[in-house]
Amino acid sequence: MSATIVAEPNVSSIVIIDSQGERIAARYFTDDLKTLHAQQQFEKSLLSKALKCSSQSESDILLFDGHIAVFREGKDVYLFVTGDQNENEIILVEVLNALYNAYASLLPGGSLDRHTMLEKLDIVLLALDEIVDSGVILEIEPSAIVNRVGMRGADAAPAPAGMMPLQAQTPQQALLSLKEQMTRAFKSTGGGFSGSG
């Protein structure tokens, strides 16, 4: 018998653009779109094709130029996940839906709009990094992405709930903040502590 090698699914790019075609965030994982000019032309093509589809379904699939692109529309933004023409579009849709749902949980008011995404660009980029790395899919569970972004963002950025810096908090606010952080950490570990003994 001969063994069949199954390639792991890969993402070629994740692109978030507004309804005018301006980039909000993007990650490219292929060599054919290395230059900024090539990326901008690709993004214009994506938006042009998406505007022609303009259906109200959760996600749509586009085939063009040797790529499969799946997309979802926010208020005034489009999220695209692309893969090679031989990639499984169901897997790409799962990545797209995970990203969309994670943003809906992470962004204030669940608002996927240009202003909010640019205002919270750190969260947008962290979520991109948590879902795909170098084209390899790391996670497709939105709650796991939200938890990881929350853990990584806690060191560098204010908490999504708009918490004040520790120095500006009253003792009661600081204790409440600590309690919330410990509760999140406890829940993310499955409700238990690991250790010897």
Image (cartoon, rainbow, N blue to C red):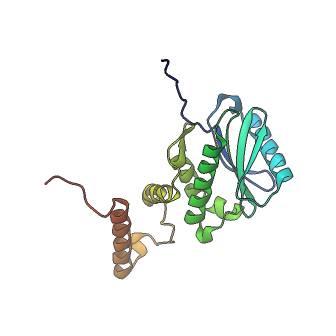
Q: Position of residue 84 (x, y in %)?
A: 68, 34
Which residue appears farthest toward the top when viewing the image?
Answer: 1
Percent from the top left, x then y, of residue 188? 37, 60
How many marks the image carries: the answer is 0
Q: Is residue 25 left or right of residue 41?
A: left
Give residue 174's position: percent from left, percent from top.
36, 75
Quarter of the image where one finds residue 116? bottom right
Question: Which residue shows up at 86% across the image and 51% down it?
Answer: 52
Nearest to the observer: residue 170 or residue 46:
46
- Please state which of residues 120 and 90 is positioned toward the viewer in this rendering: 90
Tell me the quarter of the image containing the C terminus.
bottom left
Q: Residue at x 71, y 61 (%)?
A: 74
The residue lying toward the viewer, choosing from 112 and 69, is: 69
Residue shown at the point (77%, 36%) measured from the top left: 37
Q: Is residue 30 above or below residue 133?
A: above
Instruction: Find the residue positioned furthest to the left.
Output: 197
Residue at 76% x, 61% y: name it: 76
Query: Residue 13's quadrant in the figure?
Result: top right
Q: Residue furthest right?
A: 52
Q: Please, is residue 14 above or below residue 170 in the view?
A: above
Q: Position of residue 85 (x, y in %)?
A: 71, 33
